[in-house]
Amino acid sequence: MSDPFSRIARRLIDESSYRQELAEVGAWLVTERYRPFVVEQHLRRMDYILGRLPPGEPAGVYSATELDAVFSLECSPVSRRCRFAATHRVYQRFLAARARLRMERSGDRFADLRQRYDQFLVDIRGLSLSSRQHHAQTVADFLKRALRPRQPLKTLTRADVERGQQRFNIYCSPCHSRIGDGNGMVVRRGYRQAASYHTEKLMKAPVGHFFDVITNGFGAMPSYASRVEPDDRWRIAAYIRVLQFSEAAPLDVVPAEMRGELDKTPETPKPTLAQGAAQ
Ligand code: HEC
């Protein structure tokens, strides 16, 4: 029978004190189609990390907090960069796939949000289980780093949204325009019509959808993953929500003293025939 592992991976497994666990993680990485070189890198790091986890042979069950405690030793206290971040994610996904990730009540503040996002990914995007787990992991990572314990999601606003606005204006508005109607400069010069964020579909889409589109691209729109780092993708996503909301805010969310002002704003002009035809 041919060995699913490269020669190097095989040696890492055979020489490890955590032979069984490394072999299982390695086999999972292979079925998830990781390249041999990447498999080797993860196995090398896992061999190092496993010595720190509480012993749980042969198939220990760990909580996300236990994993965090161990992997965070590899993070720089100054830059907060984590050398083993990718391996951390991979191992957590592996444990989840093997039903070996212990659920935690307290760490589950956003369980409902994540559940709805997951459902959306199934219904609208039709993503596979492993992509969905990957998304869920990214969301969880972000929430953990962006929010202090007990801080509710709503407090992730001002500074983040302002940064989101700034990034949006750099990366997205050339096509989507500053108000998000899809008629940015580039489009006016003849590039393909970009999407308006004010459609019913996108109004109803969860914030994670915008993260997804920036990360993976969508139809004719390329991915911006190499230019916009994950945290900024969330900030842009949050800012798009604000844009949508500011275009469609129902009256009762406007402070009472300002409602009179709103009544004075002129009605949006009816689209002319030419604009109508361009839709
Ligand atoms: C070069 C032009 C261009 C840039 C820059 C651009 N987009 Fe797009 N975007 C498009 C086009 C074109 C579409 C429509 C794609 C299609 O339907 O095939 C689109 C579609 C979208 C959609 C709608 C997806 C859906 O579900 O229908 C979202 C959301 C979106 N873009 C977000 C962004 C964000 C956020 C940025 C900035 C990080 C961005 N775009 C930058 C051209 C662009």
Image (cartoon, rainbow, N blue to C red):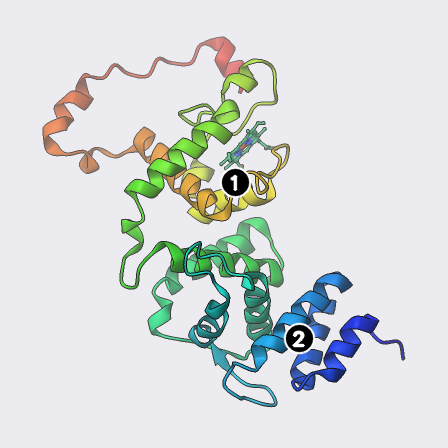
Q: Is residue 96 above or below residue 245?
A: below
Circle 2: residue type? Val
Q: Can you tell which quarter of the image residue 220 is in?
A: top right
Circle 1: residue type? Val
Q: Position of residue 44 (x, y in %)?
A: 67, 72
Q: Can you tell which quarter of the image residue 39 is in?
A: bottom right
Whether residue 172 appears in this view of the structure is no
Split into 4 quadrants, where in the image is the N terminus? Answer: bottom right
Q: Nearer the viewer, residue 279 or 237?
A: 237
| Residue marked by disc 2 | 25
Q: Nearer the viewer, residue 116 or 114?
A: 114
Q: In the figure, is residue 16 to the left or right of 199?
A: right
Decide: few, some or many residues near mark 2? Use Cα within 10 Å; few <14, some 14-19, many ≥20: some
Name the residue at 44% across, 10% down: 272
Name the residue at 49% across, 45% down: 211
**Element carrying mark 1:** loop
The CA distance from mark 1 to mark 2 is: 31 Å
